[in-house]
Amino acid sequence: MHRTLITGGAGFLGSHLCDYLLNKDHEVICMDNLLTGSLLNIKHIKNDRFNFIEHNVTNFINIDGPLDYILHFASPASPIDYLEHPIPTLKVGSLGTHNVLGLAKKKKSVLLIASTSEVYGDPLIHPQREDYWGNVNPVGPRGVYDEAKRFAEAITMAYHRYHNIDTKIVRIFNTYGPRMRLNDGRAIPNFIKQALTGNEITAFGDGSQTRSFCYVSDLIEGIYRLLMSDINDPTNIGNPIEMTIKQMADKVLQATGSHSKITYLSLPEDDPKVRQPNIDKAVKYLDWKPRVQLDEGLKSTIDYFKTQLGIETQ
């Protein structure tokens, strides 16, 4: 039986990873300081192979016994979170990543770190390939997240090259699904909550900026395949179907049957104008591509939000 540590395991993606690896017969240690994660995301887990530890990974990490895998997903991940918690965001990407690398070295574990499409910044290359170095403002308000993840990638590759640790780096593009927070601040949860409560849909800019939305189960499958692969350099995992924010707002209105109006707010500083992954590498080497269609993914996500809001689902 494999023994796996998931940092940030009570978060949106981390909790889905807990479920997935438990179904793969792993013993799972879920570690989270609950800054943005929630025990509600893991309360359904009734399994003697599951253990929760409340801990901040920017402090020294001690795990008794062997560890086969470490998945480092601890970090604020939405703009509303990392703008509110800029220093913890920088610390978890630097000190936290250093600590899990030290643990991986000690335990001889395979380590996968969660990076992000934000390492590409406001890209000048479209779609974004793994060999693109990015266009990032290191001192802008979003730099606390972008640079934390870029540093995490750099130190991970340094440990791989110098200490010969088996490391993986997944660059995650926009992902959605159940267990996103109502106040997450990102487009899909914002739009769904506003549509279901009859409030105006608030989109930033003129709605023409683009994103590529991947359903959570597809992303988790891609992450697992990367974890089990022999790839050590960064790999994009996301849905290459690009759409404008206005198109997504219209999709949510259609799916919810809402008559809310769309209003437009000023575009935040350094907000990317385009975002679309090139996933040729994942397709070729992981035999992975997203399978869940947007309408299907939105339905399950909307149903989840209805439950959170106390609205009956049909």
Image (tube, rainbow, N blue to C red):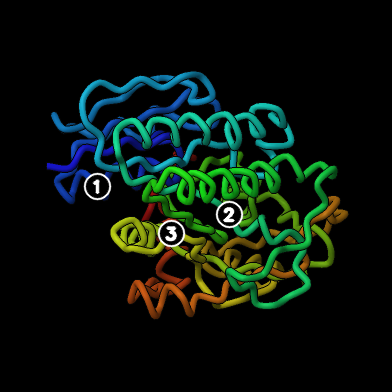
Helix, strand or loop at disc 2?
strand
Mark 3 → mark 2, Cα distance in angstroms:
16 Å
Tell whether 247 sits left or right of 13: right
Tell whether 96 sits left or right of 14: right
Q: Name the residue under label 3.
A: 232
* Amino acid on which the number 3 mark rests in the picture: Asn
**Residue 49 x, y percent position in the rendering:** 16, 32
* Quarter of the image that includes the C terminus: bottom left
Tell me what residue is drawn at x 72 percent, y 32 percent: 86
Asked whether the beta carbons under mark 3 and mark 2 sit within 8 Å of each other, the answer is no
Pointer 1 or 2: first along the chain: 1
Helix, strand or loop at disc 1?
helix
Tell me what residue is drawn at x 25 percent, y 35 percent: 67
* Amino acid on which the number 2 mark rests in the picture: Thr
Of 269 and 188, nearer the camera is 269
Tell me what residue is drawn at x 67 percent, y 33 percent: 90
Image mark for residue 116: 2
Of 283 and 206, nearer the camera is 283
Helix, strand or loop at disc 3?
loop
Pointer 3 or 1: first along the chain: 1
* Quarter of the image that includes the N terminus: top left
Mark 3 → mark 1, Cα distance in angstroms:
21 Å
